[in-house]
Amino acid sequence: MLTAYDYPTALAIDQAGIDSILVGDSLGMVVLGYENTLPVTMQDMLHHCRAVARGARYALLVGDMPFMSYQADVADAVRNAGRFLQEGGMDAVKLEGGRERVEAIRAIVGAGIPVMGHLGLTPQSVNQFGGFLAQGKTASAARQLLEDAFLLEQAGCFSIVLESVPDRLAELVSRRLGIPTIGIGAGAGCDGQVLVTHDLLGLFDRFTPRFVKKYADFYEKMGAAFDAFKADVEGRAFPSKEHTFSISEDEWRQFLAEVE
């Protein structure tokens, strides 16, 4: 699974045969420039979901429910989840949290909307955690995460993202669940893996999480391309003949005769 927030990225990911595309609320940081995901709204998410849905034909499309779109009220959670399918073109939704989200998950699934869970480092709880810190590193925290995973499965989740948890814990959870796990910073023992595409491509230069493998450095390449464009324009090397349109000599002479 990879993230996408626009049509061309979704098209490329889909054509690469990636199984699932997540329209993540990570767009708040890598696209909109926020410090975290908390300011992202339903309007933001639906706008980007529609763009992704226009680009992808084969991948399973999962929309990330933003902060406060499901936490306060179960009825609101169901309505907002439905909007991702009805207005955003998604196939499923993802929401963060464990036992405290079971009631909302049951209601959303009961409305016929597939739900992907998310445990471990849940970015919408960053203030509660005191930062983007790995989770499940004590015996009690690991036990709670395992219990929460079972609760999410029982509530009807079809899959669970495990983020920034010890690899042995993620592998154990993956073995014991009957639904697939998708890891991000959770080791190779999960059933699948997800990365933020901007991290994978080296497009987000503010910071790179430890669990990210950069497969390209597009930020550096963009800078070089912008520098080359600027130099070409200043040196009048661009646009050249191949990039311009022409008018015939007869038409040009007639034009000059009319205006002079």
Image (tube, helix red, strand yellow):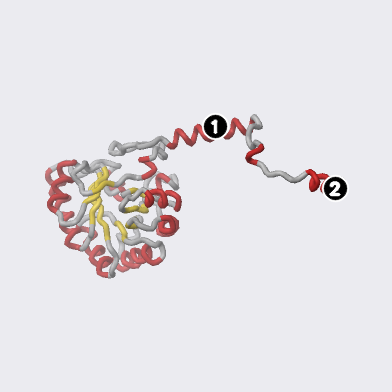
Which residue matches tag 2? 259
Which residue is rendered at x = 29% and y = 56% of the image?
A: 95
| Amino acid bearing label 2 | Val
* Residue found at the very far bottom of the displayed protein: 111
CB contact under 8 Å: marks 1 and 2: no
Instruction: Mark 1 or mark 2: name the one nearer the start of the chain.
Output: 1
- Residue 111 visible in rendering: yes
Q: Of residues 93 and 103, which is closer to you in this image?
A: 93
140 relative to 76, above or below: above
* Residue 207 occupies quadrant: top left
Q: Position of residue 223 (x, y in %)?
A: 49, 34
Which residue is rendered at x = 83% and y = 48% of the image?
A: 254
Numbered disc 1: secondary structure:
helix
Numbered disc 2: secondary structure:
helix
Image quarter in which the C terminus is found = top right
Which residue matches tag 1? 227
Which residue is rendered at x = 42% and y = 49% of the image?
A: 9
| Amino acid bearing label 1 | Asp
In this picture, residue 146 sits left or right of residue 1: left
